[in-house]
């Protein structure tokens, strides 16, 4: 396994700060819902929310990749490590489910 230098201590220091900020987000009050009034605005909203979801999924994958000590790209691409590929697939699905629930909620 190729062990690379990682910024895990940096992420470890940032995580408690992010967790402390969550109650501030939740305490903002009631959330208003938005419903599109035409097919065009629904299509535009779908594209925008889809792009936001893709960007957030990529950012979540990069954050996960920065937290672990293994070079996933090398493990999957060069060494054909099926276990690493399954780990990445499960992680991407988990992040995508969280993002979908957030965008739809």
Image (tube, rainbow, N blue to C red):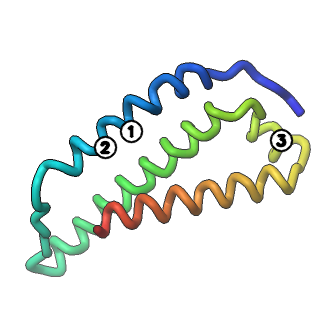
Q: Quadrant of residue 38?
A: bottom left
Work out whether mark 3 precedes mark 1 in sequence or the reverse, and give the earlier one. 1
Query: How far from the left and from the top, in percent, is residue 20?
Result: 33, 35
How far apart marks 1 and 2 lie (CA) works out to 5 Å
Q: Residue at left 11%, top 61%?
A: 30
- Left or right relative to 49: residue 81: right
Q: Quick one: SS at disc 3?
A: helix
CB-based contact (under 8 Å), mark 3 and mark 1:
no
Query: How far from the left and from the top, in percent, is residue 101?
Result: 38, 66
How far apart marks 3 and 1 lie (CA) works out to 31 Å
CB-based contact (under 8 Å), mark 1 and mark 2:
yes
Q: Residue at left 55%, top 37%?
A: 63
Residue 8 vs residue 61, the one in the foreground = 8
How crowded pointer 3 is (Cα within 10 Å; few <14, some 14-19, many 20+) is rated as some
Q: Quick one: SS at disc 1?
A: helix
Query: How far from the left and from the top, in percent, is residue 103?
Result: 32, 62
- Left or right relative to 80: residue 87: left
Residue placed under numbered mark 3 in the picture: 75
**Number of dots carrying numbers:** 3
Residue placed under numbered mark 2 in the picture: 22
Q: Tell me the quadrant of the picture where the C terminus can be found.
A: bottom left
Q: Tell me the quadrant of the picture where the N terminus can be found.
A: top right
Which of label 3 and label 1 is nearer to you?
1
Query: How far from the left and from the top, in percent, is residue 22?
Result: 31, 43
Which of label 2 and label 3 is nearer to you?
2
Residue 46 vs residue 66, the one in the foreground = 66
Q: Quick one: SS at disc 2?
A: helix
């Amino acid at each position: 396994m190729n062990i690379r230098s990682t910024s895990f201590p940096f992420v470890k220091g940032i995580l408690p700060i992010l967790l402390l900020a969550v109650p501030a987000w939740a305490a903002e009050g009631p959330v208003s819902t938005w419903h599109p009034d035409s097919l065009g605005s629904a299509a535009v909203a779908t594209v925008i929310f889809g792009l936001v979801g893709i960007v957030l999924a990529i950012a979540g994958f990069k954050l996960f990749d920065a937290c672990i000590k293994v070079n996933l790209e090398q493990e999957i691409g060069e060494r054909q490590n099926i276990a690493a590929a399954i780990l990445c697939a499960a992680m991407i699905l988990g992040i995508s489910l969280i993002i979908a629930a957030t965008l739809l909620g």
